[in-house]
Amino acid sequence: MSAFIVLGAQWGDEGKGKITDYLAKNSDVVVRFQGGSNAGHTVETGGKQYKLHLIPSGILYGDKINIIGNGVVLDPKALFEEIDYLKKAYVNISPQNLIISDRAQLVMPYHKVLDGIKERSRGKKDIGTTGKGIGPCYTDKMERSGIRICDLIHQDVFEEKLRENLKVKNDIITKVYGEKPLEFDSIYNEYINYGKALEPYVKDISVEVYRNIKDGRKVLFEGAQGTLLDVDYGTYPYVTSSSTIAGGVCIGSGIGPTVITGAVGVAKAYTTRVGKGPFPTELFDETGNWLRENGHEYGVTTGRARRCGWLDLVILKTSARLSGLTSFAITKIDTLAGLEKVKVCIGYKLNGKVIDYVPASLEDLARCEPVYEEFQGWNRSIENARTYDELPGAAKKYLSKIEDFTDTKISIVSVGPGRDQTIDVSHI
Ligand code: GDP
Ligand code: IMO
Ligand code: MG
């Protein structure tokens, strides 16, 4: 029995797609449990690059079952665009290898409109969302007015729920924000067609996931976003609207915590963030620009330049605690090659004391001064290393520091975007 979690240990874009694809080789099922099309996961294999937003990264193998869980907010337009994109790239997708939860919430056109309007109304305090309607859709879920996939399949239920929702949303859009209302007919017709196309893929995925685990199959859970974007434990309110930590797996896929067998936290060898919000180790200098260009740090979903900074071990330690990580997968260590010195943050100085956790208050976090430890860099390019021993001594020291500080071992070191550019340090 195996139920293994892959999740982001920083602010997203750590390389979860690459690590999930790598681990999926020896798995049977891959499950997305939260988030939506705000995610952008890249997988490179056979000289081709694939960008995935909603569909789990196990899809490229053809013979793995991929599940979109109830915790995901599903934009059917984005889903069918992704299916078309993958089919054009000769990826096999059918109800045999893609299953979608009947309980997943639907992202509606008014969610996307409201995401944009709310961001504009926040002015300088905007979150820098992806504009995919994620926050407004999760708001409706919690407010208990959301429309689920099972509702879409029952056309009369869908019609009633859409009418009720649209009336309220149009009131907000026109009366609060003074913008144009959305029309019922076009949304209804578009979504009824999505409902028909979705039906063959839709099931109670809790039953599917549980059965697969009990039957001894290997199930991987693929997180989206990252620990510091978690709605409870991230840098609130500069976060996404879902539970990105390990606890989110149980809720978002309908299983209990006792069946989980391990969790790997994916972390970049440095830190990046897209969108607004605090980032203690952010670099505004030449090194920050160098990391961005050398690491191709531009968003998969929005194309925005990612903010870059030194590796923050306080964040990794926090992530290990919050998700009970059994190991880390460290990615993009190849990007650091060529720097004379590399730094890691080993604490925050706050009110004359050094702390090793992320404070809740953004005001406190803004006053945190990172405490750095400096390491010798390595010049040698390492993208062709395939064993731990082939790594330069300086890179090994850097990796050892991560293990010591977080009290968590490293199971995978990634030295390039390709599936084969991966060092299996200790078999998970
Ligand atoms: P995700 O959202 O966590 O799946 O990560 P993204 O796909 O948004 O961003 C990670 C980027 O880094 C992608 O372009 C990957 O192809 C790339 N990548 C992943 N691992 C490595 C690595 O070890 N080295 C390098 N150079 N690139 C990597
Ligand atoms: P993956 O899965 C990086 C960020 C946005 C914004 C905040 C809220 O590829 O790692 P949202 O649209 O979710 O309401 O935006 O969260 N964000 C991500 N940053 N990677 C992601 O996904 C992200 N998904 C959302 O930039 O700051
Ligand atoms: Mg990404």
Image (tube, rainbow, N blue to C red):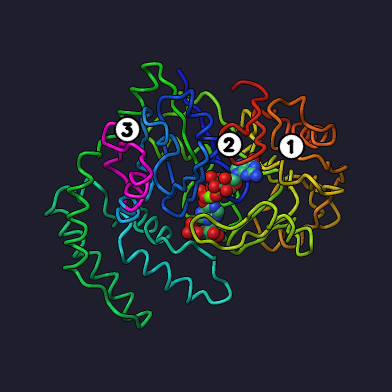
The alpha-carbon separation of the residues under discs 3 and 2 comes to 28 Å
Query: Quick check: 379 left or right of 318?
Result: right
Residue 66 occupies quadrant: top left
Q: Quadrant of residue 424?
A: top right
Give residue 97's mark: 3
Magenta includes 99? Answer: yes
Q: Quadrant of the N terminus?
A: top left
Q: Where residue 417 appears, x then y in whole percent?
A: 60, 41
Q: Which residue is mark 2?
A: 323
Q: Earlier in the sequence, mark 3 or mark 2?
A: 3
Which of the image's four quarters has the C terminus? top right
Q: Is residue 226 visible?
A: no
In the rendered structure, are the residues bearing label 1 and label 3 in contact, judged by CB atoms less than 8 Å apart? no
Farthest residue in the left direction?
156
Residue found at x 35% / y 54%: 78
Quadrant of the picture in which ligand 1 is shown = top right
- First in sequence, mark 2 or 1: give its number: 2
Left or right: residue 352 versus residue 220 is right
Q: Position of residue 271 (x, y in %)?
A: 69, 50
The residues tagged by marks 1 and 3 sit, at their Cα atoms, a distance apart of 36 Å
Residues at marks 2 and 1, CA–CA distance in whole angstroms = 30 Å
Residue type at mark 1: give it: Ile
Residue range (magenta):
81-105
Discs 3/2, front: 3
Q: How many marks?
A: 3
Residue ID at (55%, 41%) = 16
Q: Dividing the picture into quarters, in which one does residue 368 lie?
A: bottom right
Amino acid type, mark 3:
Asn
Q: Position of residue 396 (x, y in %)?
A: 80, 32
The residue that disc 1 covers is 382
